[in-house]
Image (tube, rainbow, N blue to C red):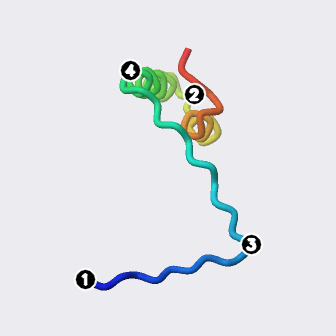
């Protein structure tokens, strides 16, 4: 195996790591996304909000 030497630009800003939701919260998020998709309301913006933690299931 070879070690990969990957360098990032000096001005590279790493996105903050998001806490991983609990299994119960993950199940709620999936159910909410499926519900939104079923009624035709799942947009890329809503999906992004759930994936970044900006929006939580109700």
Given this view, does label 4 or label 2 mark the residue nearer the observer? 4
Q: CA distance from mark 3 to mark 4?
A: 38 Å
Mark 3 or mark 1: name the one nearer the start of the chain: 1
Disc 2 residue crowd, few under 14, some 14–19, many 20+, Cα 10 Å: few
The circle on residue 24 is 4
Secondary structure of the residue carrying numbered label 3: loop
In depth, the one of 39 and 25 nearer the eye is 25
Given this view, does label 4 or label 1 mark the residue nearer the observer? 1
User: From this viewpoint, which residue is outermost toward the top?
Assistant: 58
Q: CA distance from mark 4 to mark 1?
A: 39 Å
Q: CA distance from mark 1 to mark 2?
A: 47 Å
Disc 4 residue crowd, few under 14, some 14–19, many 20+, Cα 10 Å: few
Given this view, does label 3 or label 4 mark the residue nearer the observer? 3
In depth, the one of 40 and 34 nearer the eye is 34
Mark 4 or mark 2: name the one nearer the start of the chain: 4
Left or right placement of residue 23 versus residue 18 in this view? left
Secondary structure of the residue carrying numbered label 1: loop
Residue at image mark 3? 11
Mark 2 or mark 3: name the one nearer the start of the chain: 3
The circle on residue 18 is none
Residue at image mark 2? 41
């Amino acid at each position: 195996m070879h070690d990969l030497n990957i360098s990032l630009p000096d001005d590279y800003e790493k996105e903050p790591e998001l806490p991983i939701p609990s299994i119960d919260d993950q199940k709620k998020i999936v159910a909410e996304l499926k519900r939104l998709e079923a009624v035709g309301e799942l947009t890329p913006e809503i999906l992004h909000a759930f994936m970044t933690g900006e929006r939580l299931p109700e």
